[in-house]
Image: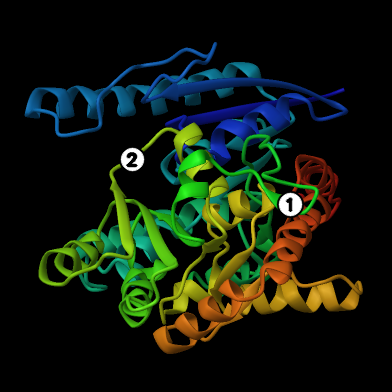
Amino acid sequence: MKSLLALGVTQLSDAYPNIKYKLELLARLKGFDCSEQLCILNNEGTDSTSFSASTGHAGICTKLLLGLKILFGHVWLSIHCTLRRPDYIYVTYPGILLTCILAVPGIRKRQSKLYLDAFISLYDTVVNDRKLLPQRHPLARLLFRVEKRAFASATRVLVDTEENALFYSQLFQLPKHQFVPLALSIPELPITKQHGSHAVTDEKAEGPSFRCIFVGTFVPLQGVQVIIDAAKQLQSIPNIEFVFIGDGQDALHLETHLQNETAKNIIWHRGHFVTEFVIREIAAADICLGIFAVSDKTQRVLPYKLYYYLALGMPILTAHTATIDRLLARCKQRHESPPFITTPAGNANALAEQIVALANDQQRVTMQGIIARQFFEHQLSTTVIQQQLLAIFDDKSSVH
């Protein structure tokens, strides 16, 4: 049996569940003796050694302590890897610094294969998407070099979509085969559609007859402003309601709208909420809204929210992107119904028109929920991801 060691200086959270549930999946992977050693920056119930630290609005001393724990975690995990000498190493997100350390000769045995779960590129997120640093900033250049070094050192880099795999190979000037797409992992979720009817709360039964829900972190690629503009156009239709859940960089757009205008058709649950609450709110909706911004990154991602919507068997309305287009083409090849209803990115008028059309077609809404769950089971379920991982680990060409 092959030895597999999972390493990471990371957080375990249902807000970003891929790390937590990918580790659970690896522990059950056939043919591998998997163990894990993690430096956990927030402890949400794990048997692994953990170092609790607050990452909120902490004081200077707390932040310094966190920095020391991160530094110690990298050193400790590197020593542990040297002592264990596993056949396979899996490094969790964000693992670029740890991967660079493990690339130093002598840290791991020469035959070990190292798989870095990059999830998304930190450089792309900070510089290209959120524009927190200009490209020529010294910190941006340093981040680029460190990330490129990590990606080049790994046997394979695991990313979330084929579009990101191609983009990162071009951005960092590395071979395309270095990046392998792997679906994200989420917890097992109940199906919210049964026998063609909604599993809704009492509030939904007494409220508006058509509810649209958006769940997100309000980052630019999600296109919150597009949804707000669509909601403005539909204010005169009393039976259509918009529910927003979350907070983040672009939350100011929604805050300003609610302050300056009469927005009777919008409810905002601002903040970060437990998964159970979010699932209940999703189940009480009629359709789920995806991402709608006009941006390069929007074209390349399949956000967590879409995984949850699909797993819960919910109808999905989202922008037509390169990733969505590829998935729809795959469905067409397999003679399967498309799990997404799409509109042009950045087009609030088209979004509003599609919402009205769906509000007047309950049969289609119900059917889309059934199709969504079927797509998840065939393309994104735990069973499918296990098969993908086995194929990645067994790839005879991935000798580094």
Most foreground residue, 61 or 299: 299
The residue under the point 65% across, 41% down is: 114
Q: Position of residue 53 (x, y in %)?
A: 28, 22
Residue with the mark numbered 1: 380
Residue at the limit of the structure toward the front, as seen here:
206
Q: What number of labels is visible?
A: 2
Q: Is residue 268 left or right of residue 56?
A: right
Compared to 318, does 103 lie above or below?
Answer: above
Q: Which mark is residue 198?
A: none
Compared to 137, does 15 lie above or below?
Answer: above
Secondary element at image label 1: loop
Determine crowd level at label 2: few under 14, some 14-19, many 20+ residues with C-alpha closer than 10 A. some
Q: Is residue 268 left or right of residue 368?
A: left
Determine crowd level at label 1: few under 14, some 14-19, many 20+ residues with C-alpha closer than 10 A. many
Most foreground residue, 291 or 368: 368
Q: Quadrant of residue 317?
A: bottom right
The residue under the point 25% across, 32% down is: 55
Q: Quadrant of residue 129?
A: bottom left
Compared to 373, does 389 lie above or below?
Answer: above
Residue with the mark numbered 2: 272
Q: Position of residue 3 (x, y in %)?
A: 76, 24
The residue under the point 21% across, 68% down is: 253
Asked whether residue 58 is in view, the answer is: yes
Q: Position of residue 314 (x, y in %)?
A: 64, 56
